[in-house]
Image: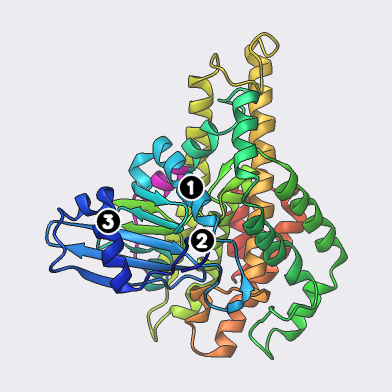
Amino acid sequence: MASDGFQPLDEKLLVEYLKSTPSLSAKLGNHFDKLEIKEVGDGNLNFVYIVIGLSGSLVIKQALPYIRCIGESWPMTKERAYFESSVLQEHGRLCPDHVPEVYHFDRTMCVIGMRYIEPPHIILRKGLIAGIEYPLLADHISEYMARTLFYTSLLYLTTTDHKSAVAKFCGNVELCRLTEQVVFSDPYKVSEYNRWTTPYLDADAEAVREDNILKLEVAELKSKFCERAQALLHGDLHTGSVMVTPNSTQVIDPEFGFYGPMGFDIGAFIGNLILAYFSQDGHADKGADRNLYKKWIVKIILDTWNLFHTKFIALWDKHKDGSGEAYLPAIYNNPELQSLVKQKYMEDLFHDTLGFGAAKMIRRIVGVAHVEDFESIKEASKRAECERKALNFAKTLLKERKNFHSITEVVSAIEDFNK
């Protein structure tokens, strides 16, 4: 055990831990004789144990003091568990239908005990690779984003409450710095961590590193990411952080959570849907294309933004005379002005969403951490062909985002690039 009381849990220690923690043993009905324990942490940062007993189940997540997939050579703060549990609890309060409940948090041991999201839930990214349609996905994820982003912004909060929340989450600086590095820095320079489908994309990766206009635009996005404390973000809202069935959507793993620009969350989700779209040709079986499924993904992209827009504005209207201090009613006191304010706010948010979404796409193709959507395409030349289309689209989207005025225009451009 470390001097600070931290101890990595193995299965034996885990059972002892469960027995000695009332809030967790209660969830298991205090029965420990036939526990089924499975370590499933396929992520990069943590131990994740699923614990199933005769009369209950739960998940235990423990943050390690280094990046698990690289080892102790890349140390990583354990404090991220505190921020993850804080975001889960805050977002869970705002959107309980789509966030797993937290039963227990232990800051010394960096342990979160939470609801087990049971089968048949699977990671959304895997569902997209398999070509499965989720009819409620856009409705659910737009609900989650609208509620978590609106209620933690100055449209709802006083500047005093907002500032104190921002101050709390400023402590998650190490994970923010990791994002700054892997999203806004590494892909645009020579870095030992970068990789891509070589030799096919060698010239494409070099073109990213030598694109002056792209770098100017990325600097603007990085500045927003670092400086704009707009709302409490999930911070890593890609399709690997969402678990789904056809009628349930659960958002997990918000350890990168902090107060940042709303478009970073919305962009992460939409950007990963666009990656899934461009990967589809690589998953088309002989004789069976994925054209219908690509149309479904396009519909989800459209619906996600459009439903988010509608729901966000509805929350704004509902609370227009509340305590939010962004637009004081005494000043924004006529319908025409209120309408102009909303239009400007949503247009800026749309452009942020496109920019951050594009940056997240680029880093998944020429940066350190790739996505299974492409990685699971066995034939390298085929994979590279899909990745190149996605990369070219992302570069265009990032540089020209302010020329797009609706999600429909974005979708048309996606389809043009895939020809």
Q: Is residue 48 above or below residue 284?
A: above
Residue at image mark 2: 273
Q: Amino acid at mark 3?
A: Ser
Q: Which mark is residue 20?
A: 3
Residue 132, image x, y percentages: 34, 66
Question: Between 29 and 294, which is closer to the camera in this rendering?
Answer: 29
Question: Within 10 Å of the Cα at label 1, are there few (<14), some (14-19), or many (20+) other Cα atoms?
Answer: many
Instruction: Residue at 34% x, 54% y: name it.
Output: 113
Question: Within 10 Å of the Cα at label 3, are there few (<14), some (14-19), or many (20+) other Cα atoms?
Answer: few
Question: Between 366 and 285, which is closer to the camera in this rendering?
Answer: 366
Q: Is residue 19 left or right of residue 219?
A: left
SS for dot 2:
helix
Residue at image mark 1: 304
Q: Is residue 181 left or right of residue 80?
A: right
Question: Within 10 Å of the Cα at label 2, are there few (<14), some (14-19), or many (20+) other Cα atoms?
Answer: many
Residue 243, image x, y percentages: 37, 59
Calculate the distance from the C-alpha at mark 2 to the C-alpha at mark 3: 43 Å
SS for dot 1:
helix
Q: Is residue 118 left or right of residue 413?
A: left
Residue furthest to the right in view is 212
- Badge nearest the viewer, 2 or 3: 3
Q: Does the rendering let one see residue 283?
A: yes
Residue 194, image x, y percentages: 69, 78
Does label 1 or label 2 sit earlier along the sequence?
2
What stretch of residues is rendered in magenta?
131-144
